[in-house]
Image (cartoon, coloured by chain):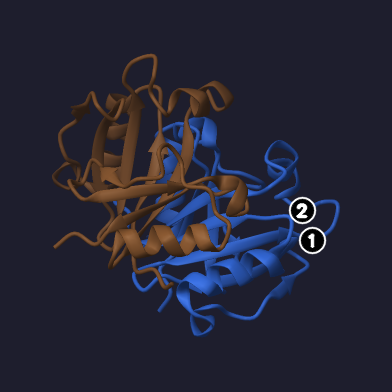
Chain colours: A brown, B blue
């Protein structure tokens, strides 16, 4: 199973507005999206384009947010995950599982902040790096 | 001060050979470089191309390695830093300092694993993310 380009780096922060301001100062305000709430995903999200890839800024939304535990360990924020594109999310998920990887949650792909199906691979199986696999956007 | 493309994500690991094998399985062996020791930098390094950017795998080399403290906190490894290209490393360093950022070490750029001058910005000033600024490779 091969993966494709790095779609984005996920960066968790306790204050997405301030973090957006910092990266907008580095990359230009025109390269930062508005902050959008995704209640079902438990996050507030903003994307910053670096030209060749994106930074995905994530602030927890609600007590069940998947980002809460990370911020408990890293109160100032930090790099949370990397996201690789795959041509077929089901085939990619199955291939990772066949190699012994653990898919988070139910194991079924769900629609992420980019509007395409994603799965997350537990970092215990990937040398400590939380990997998101994303169906290539059309 | 504006920055350019994301040159790479730095990923620290206690076992660079095993981590290289894992990413070579995802990206193809032809996209992973040989592992090279940089005694002056205190790291063993391998690059994996994702097409649009690179993963820089880092294993500590020696007791003074700058990666040791990270692995004490994250024994399995994890995302260590992000690297942005800048057109002029001195101007970029000065602009970051003028904004109150702390440059690690002596504050002077030094030659990194890519053969061009770099500086690192302390994560306390960048929402928990260790940022490397790299003079754009020619």
Residue B3 image point, x, y percent: 33, 54
User: Mark 2 falls on what kind of element?
Assistant: loop
Above or below: residue A132 compared with residue B74: below
- Residue A7 percent across, percent down from the top left: 31, 57
Residue plotted at (40% across, 38% down): A106
Foreground of the two, B105 or A96: A96
Residue at x 31%, y 59% (from the top left corner): A89
**Residue at the spot 62% in from the left edge and 71% down from the top edge:** B21
Q: Is residue B117 visible?
A: yes
Q: Is residue B1 visible?
A: no
Badge 2 local density, few (<14 within 10 Å), some, or many (20+)?
some
- Residue drawn at point x = 32 percent, y = 64 percent: A86
* Circles 1 and 2 in contact, beta carbons < 8 Å: yes
Q: Is residue B26 left or right of residue B109?
A: left
SS type, badge 1: loop
Q: Which residue is mark 2?
A: B65
The image quarter in which residue A107 lies: top left
* Chain holding disc 1: B
To the question of a shared chain for discs 1 and 2, the answer is: yes
Vertical relation: B43 (above or below) A41 = below
What percent of the width, then of the height, locates residue A17? 27, 25
Q: Chain under label 2? A: B
Looking at the picture, does residue A137 appear above or below residue A78?
below
Q: What quarter of the picture does the C terminus of chain B occupy?
A: bottom left
Residue at the disc numbered 1: B61
The quadrant where residue A2 appears: bottom left
């Amino acid at each position: 199973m091969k993966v494709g380009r790095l779609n984005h780096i996920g960066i968790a922060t306790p204050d997405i507005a301030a973090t957006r301001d910092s990266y907008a100062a580095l990359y230009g305000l025109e390269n930062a999206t508005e902050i959008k709430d995704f209640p079902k995903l438990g996050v507030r999200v903003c994307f910053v384009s670096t030209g060749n890839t994106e930074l995905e800024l994530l602030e927890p939304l609600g007590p069940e947010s998947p980002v809460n535990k990370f911020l408990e360990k890293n109160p100032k924020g930090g790099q949370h995950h990397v996201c690789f594109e795959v041509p077929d999310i089901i085939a990619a998920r199955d291939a990772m599982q066949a190699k012994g990887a653990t898919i988070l949650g139910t194991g079924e792909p769900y629609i992420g902040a980019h509007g395409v199906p994603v799965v997350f691979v537990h970092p215990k199986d990937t040398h400590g790096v939380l990997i998101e696999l994303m169906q290539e956007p059309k």
